[in-house]
């Protein structure tokens, strides 16, 4: 097999890689020139569909297919929202792209907008990324100055405006309908689907919401062709009719107890072990790995003996996790206590729940309270059953919540209780040997400094 | 009638955003950012004035404002907002201890502003800089792999 050549991160590390000059010197804005006015928008979408590109934001929905859900011959306007609100703990691949190669993202956006007949695009970026904001804003200005944005871009008869929109810090804005509500100036409360955004999205018009890395991939599909894209990754599993295959390069974010944390580009399907050894330089301080999160905290957890798990869209699912998610691998060494990890993830989700649906709002904060009690050495074994019950009842599967946040909150609970129940029981017995006698009512506990 | 808070420049800036969206309401978050940047909070009077510009009811702007923890209303925050990330990747590398150390040094709890008005100490759920854990965002500057000693220097350097 040929040596894998990174393309998404090819410019990262170069001097002034974020400028149009460097981007064009390295072949930038050639793909968009090949497409605009030369290939019909419908065929551009077909090409992306044929490439098998799946959205890199977390859900892994086929991008080309998503575009075809737009109503045919709609009089417009059709909006395009770039989801640059990654807030999943462990995830920072979009930040790297936006800080170090913003033009790559913009070029992918231009092609995507052209394919979907969209003339106004909103670049929705979280406010915690001041440097990415600055560089993207500058890149957009450079594009307007060069005639790459605005009226009749690249001399074609296609016009496109991209507006950078800054969020205000809320994980839920990464959910596509939450993002749309926030863009419209409201609280980011996800909408009940259907109607899906493709039919009725931003400002009640058909809308495409794509992730930053997805847009970057679109650019490379037109630079290098569908065959190149399909030659990377893993084909569909013949035994799983729901597996659409996982093609293309992927950015993996490696963090936690690792020698060389960072954002690395590798083919979809690389195993956790390979990622840690080949890219991450092994576990820090010569310790042993205990577990890892395969794709952001909402995906669940892998034990050290499951590190042969391939990181493609269907790999982590085979090991009892929710999925690949954002491919953010957070490694934990042998010193980590699972109760701390659980507490951290529960706290995150209870803080970030938008509060719209009762199972999520109450369930996440209840889990946090229970874990606070357990952590404080006042837990009882029955609390683990309660946690398991919360994990089973707050998720989206029974259709009791509008969006997937509750499901994301449930997976770490379900997964950890299944894989590490013994350790959690041990912790409770050790820290609260008297059991019932030493337990306080859970309602009396305050959430830790939530304001 | 309370005195006007929004300056002509702020209003002009907000109006510039209005032209980007098909609905005036969409300029709400940008407007809140504009006011927050200048005043380090968004007072109630500013909410009323933003609502006027965007042809909304003040409660609609207030509703949006309160959803995003980023905006504070009651009193101006410190000169510099210092966010300490406490998400799992940072926590694994000592973020909770770092935040505790800083709370102790600054004599404030996360969410509060120091008595001298220099620093508003806050925690962030995830700063998206997990490869540099534990990390701190001070104003617009990201500080990477921050030790307690480096945090001391950072805090001392903020005017």
Image (spheres, coloured by chain):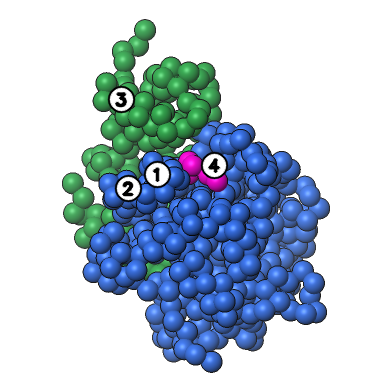
Chain colours: A blue, B green
Q: Are marks 4 and 3 on the same chain?
A: no
Q: Is residue A107 left or right of residue A388?
A: left
Q: Which residues are magenta?
A: A117-122
Q: Is residue B45 left or right of residue A224?
A: left
Q: Residue at x 66, y 53 (%)?
A: A68
Q: Are marks 2 and 3 on the same chain?
A: no
Q: Is residue A314 left or right of residue A226?
A: right
Secondary structure at badge 2 equals: loop
CB contact under 8 Å: marks 1 and 2: yes
Foreground: disc 2 or disc 4 = 2
Q: Are marks 3 and 1 on the same chain?
A: no
Secondary structure at badge 4 equals: strand
Residue tagged by mark 1?
A152
Disc marking residue A147: 2
Residue tagged by mark 3?
B12
Vertical placement of A218 versus A146: above or below?
below
In the rendered image, residue B66, in percent from the top left (x then y), is placed at: 50, 33
Disc marking residue A79: 4
């Amino acid at each position: 097999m040929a040596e894998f050549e990174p393309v998404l991160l090819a410019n990262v590390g170069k001097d002034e890689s974020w400028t149009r000059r460097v981007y064009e010197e390295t072949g930038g804005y050639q793909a968009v020139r090949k497409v605009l006015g030369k290939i019909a928008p419908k065929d551009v979408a077909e090409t992306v569909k044929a490439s098998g590109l799946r959205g890199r934001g977390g859900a892994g929905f086929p991008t080309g297919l998503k575009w075809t859900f737009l109503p045919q011959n709609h009089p417009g306007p059709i909006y395009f929202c770039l989801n640059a609100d990654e807030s999943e703990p462990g995830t920072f691949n979009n930040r790297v792209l936006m800080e170090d190669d913003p033009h790559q993202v913009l070029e992918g956006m231009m092609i995507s907008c052209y394919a979907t007949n969209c003339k106004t695009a909103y670049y929705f970026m979280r406010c915690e990324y001041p440097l990415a904001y600055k560089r993207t804003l500058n890149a957009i200005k450079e594009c307007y100055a060069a005639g790459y944005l605005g009226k009749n871009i690249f001399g074609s008869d296609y016009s496109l405006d991209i507006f950078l929109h800054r969020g205000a810090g809320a994980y839920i804005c990464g959910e596509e309908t939450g993002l749309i509500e926030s863009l419209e100036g409201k609280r980011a409360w996800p909408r009940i689907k259907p109607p899906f955004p493709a039919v009725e999205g931003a400002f009640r018009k058909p809308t495409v919401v794509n992730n930053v890395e997805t847009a970057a991939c679109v650019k490379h599909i037109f630079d290098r062709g569908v065959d190149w894209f399909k030659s990377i990754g893993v084909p569909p599993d013949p035994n799983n009719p729901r597996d659409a295959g996982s093609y293309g390069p992927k950015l993996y974010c490696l963090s936690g107890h690792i020698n060389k944390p960072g954002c690395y580009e590798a083919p979809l399907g690389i195993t956790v072990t390979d990622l840690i050894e080949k890219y991450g330089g092994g576990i820090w301080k010569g310790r042993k790995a205990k577990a890892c999160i395969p794709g952001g905290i909402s995906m669940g957890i892998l034990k050290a003996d499951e590190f042969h798990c391939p990181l493609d869209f269907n790999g982590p699912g085979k090991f009892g996790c929710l999925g690949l998610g954002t491919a953010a691998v957070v490694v934990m060494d042998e010193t980590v206590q699972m109760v701390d990890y659980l507490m951290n993830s529960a706290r995150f989700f209870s803080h970030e729940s938008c509060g719209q649906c009762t199972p999520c709002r109450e369930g996440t904060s209840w889990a946090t309270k229970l874990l606070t009690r357990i952590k404080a050495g006042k837990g009882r074994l029955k609390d683990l059953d309660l946690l398991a019950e919360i994990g089973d009842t707050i998720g989206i599967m029974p259709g009791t919540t509008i969006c997937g946040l509750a499901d994301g909150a449930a997976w770490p609970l379900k997964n950890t209780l299944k894989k590490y129940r013994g350790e959690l029981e041990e912790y409770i017995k050790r820290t609260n040997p008297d059991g019932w006698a030493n337990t306080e009512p859970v309602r009396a506990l305050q959430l830790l400094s939530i304001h | 009638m309370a005195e006007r808070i929004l300056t002509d420049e702020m209003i002009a800036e907000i109006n510039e955003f209005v032209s980007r969206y098909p609905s005036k309401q969409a300029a709400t978050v940008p407007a809140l950012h504009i006011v927050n940047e200048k005043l380090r909070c968004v007072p109630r009077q500013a909410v009323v004035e933003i609502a006027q510009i965007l042809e909304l009811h003040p409660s609609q702007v207030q509703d949006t404002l309160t959803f995003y923890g980023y905006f504070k209303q009651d009193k101006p925050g410190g000169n510099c907002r210092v966010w300490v990330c406490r998400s799992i990747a940072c926590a694994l590398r000592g973020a909770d201890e770092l935040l505790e150390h800083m709370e102790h040094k600054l004599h404030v709890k996360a969410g509060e502003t120091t008595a001298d008005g220099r620093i508003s100490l806050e925690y962030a759920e995830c700063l998206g800089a997990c490869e540099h854990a534990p990390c701190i965002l001070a104003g617009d500057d990201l500080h990477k792999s921050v030790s307690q000693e480096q945090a001391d220097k950072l805090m001392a350097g903020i005017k």
